[in-house]
Amino acid sequence: MESAPQFSKRIVTERLAFPIISVIFLSLLYALFVDFLPVISGAYADRRLMLCFLLLMSVIICLWCLVYDGLSGAHCLTLWPFAPLTLCLMFFAFQSSTTAFAAVEAIFYALFFVSFGLTGYCIRKAGLLNLTVEVLVFAIGVACFFYSAMTVTVYLFAVADDFSGLDQVIPWGFVNIRYWSHLATWFLPLLPLAALVIPFRTNRLWIPGMAVTAAIWWWIVFLSGSRGTMVGLATAVIIILLVFGRAFLPWFKTFFRYFVFGVATWLLLSVIIPSVVFGELQIRNLRTDSSGRMPLWQEAWTMSLQKFPFGMGPQSWLTHDILTDSYQGSKKVGHPHNMYLMWAAEYGWLTLVAMALPAIVGFRRLLAARTQVAQHSKPHLLCLIGISASVLAALIHAAVSAVFIAPASMLAGFLILSMFWALTSQYSLALPAISKGVGWVGRGVGVVLILIVAGGGGWWLMEVWRYHNAMIIDTAYYEEHIELGRVPRFWAHGNYPRHPSLMPPLNDSPD
C-alpha cells in the first residue's frame, strides 16, 4: 500500500479516480446523512431514487468500458454467474401480473446484482483496485467518524434536557433502528482496515479517531439491541477464522479491541452516567425470541411451495391471500424479515438457486485467494479479510432482516460487494485467450446491449417514478381507511400495492 503523499498524488493524477471517489462519497452521504441534504420526496424515497439511478448508470458505464476494451468471451466467462439470475428476474418482470408495478422490483434486483459484479470486474480490469479499496475504507472511516460525533452531540443534548429515553433518539436519521443496524453490519468489519491498511494509518490522530469511532458505533449496537448485527458479525468472524486461520489475527485483534472499547463506552454512557443523572440504567432488553418473525417465515415458506419451483410473483407478499393461520393473526409487515424466504416466496426457489451462483463462485474465489494471497503484501490480505467479513455478516443478517430492501443498506452493500467481487476476481483462474476477430463481433453485440439497457433502463426509471407518484396518491386513502400503519418496503409507505380487498375503489385507484 502507498504512503499518504503517494495516495493523494494518485487521486489527483488518476483520470478515473474522481468519478469513483464521487460515487463512494455520494453513496455514503445519502446512506448516513440524507437528513442534511435537500430532499425531493423524503429521506427514504430519495435514497431509493439515488440507488436506482446509481445501479442503472453503473451498468451502462461498465458495459461501455467493456465494449471500449473489446467485449470478449473472457468478459462473458468472468461474469457468467449473474446471467441465470438476470434471466430469472427479467422473466418475472415481464411475465408476472401480480401488480401494476411488478416489473419495478424485479428489474431493481436484477440491476443490483449485475451492477456490483460489473463494477467490481471493471475496477480490477482498469487497475484501480488498490486505489478504490483505500478510498472506500477511508470514506467509510470518515463517514462513521462524523456520524459518531453527531451522535455524541445528540446524547449530550438528551442528558442536558433530562431526557432518559436515549434509545428513542439514538441511532438517528432512520425511520427504524433496524435500518441503521444494517449499516453497522456492513461497516464495523471495515473500521479495523482504516487503522491497518490505508495511508493515513501513520497519522497520530487517525488511529485514536478510528478507535473512538468504532467504540461509539459498538455502543449504538448495544444501546439499540441490534441482535442481527451481533449474530451476523459473530458468525462472520468464525467463518473467516476457519477460512484464513492465523492470518486473520491482525485484523481480529483490532476488531476485538474496538469491541472492548464499545463495551467500555456502553458502560460509561448507558450505565454510569444515566444512573447518576437519571437515577436509572439505559439498558435495552436483549430479546431471545423471534420478535414475531416465526409467523412471517411460516407464511413465506408456504408461499414458496405454492408454485414450486416458481414463486407467486413480485410483490405477491403484499397482495396474496393469506395462507397460514399464524400469519392471519399476526402483525402485517412489508416483508417477512428474511430476504431468502421472501425471494423464494415471490421469485421461486429456482431464482434463489440462481442467486446462490454468484455467492458460490465468490466463495470459491475467496478460497483460491486464501492460497495465493501470500504472494502479495500483507495489506492485500487484511483487505480481503475485512471486506469478506463485512459481506458474510450482511448475508447472515439478511436471514433475519431487510438488508437487501432498505435503500441505505443497499447503497453501502453495492460499494462493498463491488470491492469483494473485485478482490476475489483477481485470484480467479486465468481465462482462455480470445480467438482472432472476436473483438469486433463482441463490440457490435456490446453496442446493441448498451442501447437495450439504456432504453429499457430509461423506461424502468419512469416506471419507478410512476410507482412513487401512485404510492403518494394512495397514502391519503391508506392513512384514512387502513389501520395497519406504515410498513416500509420499496418506499416508506411500502404496503402499496396490497391485497385487492384493501385497495381503494377501482375508479379512485392511483394506478
Image (cartoon, rainbow, N blue to C red):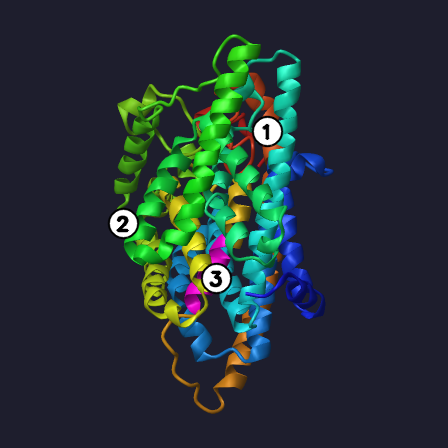
User: Residue 365 occupies which quadrant of the picture?
Assistant: bottom left
Pick whichever of labels 3 and 2 is earlier in the sequence.
Answer: 2
- Estimate the spatial distance between the alpha carbons at disc 3 and disc 2, rounded to whole Å: 44 Å
The structure residue drawn at horizontal position 63% and vertical position 52%, both measured from the top left corner, is 203
Alpha carbon distance from label 1 to label 3 = 34 Å
| Residue 147 vertical position relative to residue 83 in the rendered view, above or below | above
Q: Which mark is residue 128?
A: none
Q: 487 or 21, which lies in front?
A: 21
Q: Which residue is mark 1?
A: 172
Label 2 CA crowd tier, 10 Å (few <14, some 14–19, many 20+): some
Residue type at mark 2 is: Pro
Viewer can see residue 460: no
Task: Give the position of the N terminus as an image quadrant.
Answer: bottom right
Residue position marked by numbered label 2 in the rendering: 309
Q: Quadrant of the C terminus?
A: top right
Q: Write down the residue under mark 3.
A: 379
The kind of residue tagged 1 is: Trp
* Dot 3 alpha-carbon crowd within 10 angstroms: few under 14, some 14 to 19, many 20 or more: some
Does 423 lie within the magenta span? Answer: yes
Start and end of the magenta stretch? Answer: 416-425
Residue 191 highlighted magenta (yes or no): no
Secondary structure beneath disc 1? loop
* Residue 9 in the image, given as x and y percentages of width and height: 69, 67
Q: Amino acid at mark 3?
A: Pro
**In the rendered image of this protein, does residue 123 appear above or below residue 487?**
below
